[in-house]
Amino acid sequence: MKIVVIGGSGLIGAKTVAILRAKGHEAVAASPRNGVDSVTGAGLNEALRGAQVVIDVSNAPSWAPDDVMAFFRASTTNLVKAEAAAGVKHHVALSVVGTDRMPDNGYFLAKVAQEKLIAESGVPYSIVRATQFLEFLGGIADAGMQDGKVHLSTGQFQPIAADDVAANVADVALGAPLNGIVDIAGPERAPLHEIVARYLKSQGDAREVVVDPKATYFGGTIDEDSLVPTGDARRGSISLEQWLQRARA
Ligand SMILES: NC(=O)c1ccc[n+]([C@@H]2O[C@H](COP(=O)([O-])OP(=O)(O)OC[C@H]3O[C@@H](n4cnc5c(N)ncnc54)[C@H](OP(=O)(O)O)[C@@H]3O)[C@@H](O)[C@H]2O)c1
């Protein structure tokens, strides 16, 4: 089956392409570096010719609220239009657990807009909402920096390895469209500050973690359950410790 992976050169995209190819599918990595731009539409119709499934794991180059909103709106609008014209049978998109529960976070608002465009497009779809990637822990620590220390919330956190995300995205893409949302999360849940502190320690990063129940997350307020699934969720199998060991190897 021909499956086009928009953002196929990225962290999740490259892993998803590899999994699908190993299963014998014709997985096409489509992104600007390969001449396919979902924001301008360049190369899109050609890439989608003969495709049965499109997986969107692209990400915006700028996460400034207006930029990320413009990116996901333009990209998703172009994708679903091109998919309808090409007769694509399944649109799969990767979103974030809790997107609809953080109204003061510009990135999450853009993902909500992306999800809405997909649900209203008429193209059969599945939305996979993942918790934060373990590969993103360093970025979360950097975003929490204030006065030389890492300020982090006590909210619950359940990060997932990119390998587990890609395996789930590929699995959903090979199934029937859900016309709905599935949550995926890592195998362990603990407060955000605890997990990032374990990560920093394992990296030999001496930055102090300040536990602050009021700390924002990328500028948005979060409560106890903002970042974790509150209902049923698929679970990844790679623990933080296993992931840290692999990263050190
Ligand atoms: N970070 C997290 O913790 C987290 C958690 C849950 C969900 N997510 C979601 O996961 C998705 C993938 O994230 P990632 O970290 O794998 O992304 P990434 O590594 O930053 O890769 C981004 C990809 O998007 C492509 N891209 C950029 N502009 C494009 C355009 N105009 N047209 C087509 N493709 C374009 C890039 O292509 P080039 O290489 O050619 O520039 C690249 O392949 C995102 O949608 C994000 O919202 C992330």
Image (cartoon, rainbow, N blue to C red):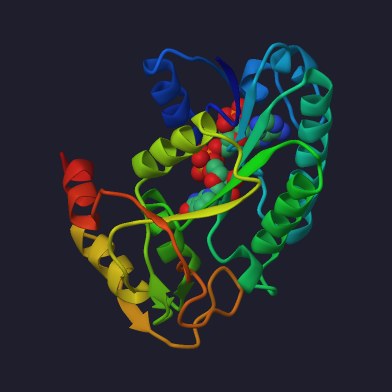
Q: Quadrant of the N terminus?
A: top right
Is 172 left, or right, of 203 in this rendering?
Answer: right
Residue 33 is left or right of residue 135, and the answer is right
Query: From this viewpoint, is residue 77 visible?
Result: yes
Image coordinates for residue 58, horizontal then vertical, percent: 61, 38
Q: Residue 147 occupies which quadrant of the picture?
A: bottom left
Q: Whole-percent x and y of residue 55?
A: 60, 32
> Which residue is at a point 63% across and 17% down the rendered structure image?
34
- On the rendered image, what quadrant is the C terminus found in? top left
- Residue at 36 percent across and 82 percent down: it is 210
Q: For residue 39, say whether it is visible.
A: no
Q: Which of 56 and 151 is in front in this view?
A: 56
- The foreground one among 224 and 206 is 224
Q: Which residue is drawn at 73% across and 60% down?
A: 65
How many numbered discs, if any?
Answer: 0
The residue lying furthest to the bottom in this view is 213
Residue found 65% across the figure and 20% down from its top: 52
Using residue 91 as the reference point, say whether residue 158 is left or right of it.
left
Please, is residue 209 above or below residue 67 in the view? Answer: below
Q: In which quarter of the image is ligand 1?
A: top right
Residue closest to the eye, 95 or 176: 176
- Residue 228 in the image, given as x and y percentages of width and height: 45, 68
Query: In x, y percent, where is residue 172?
Result: 50, 38
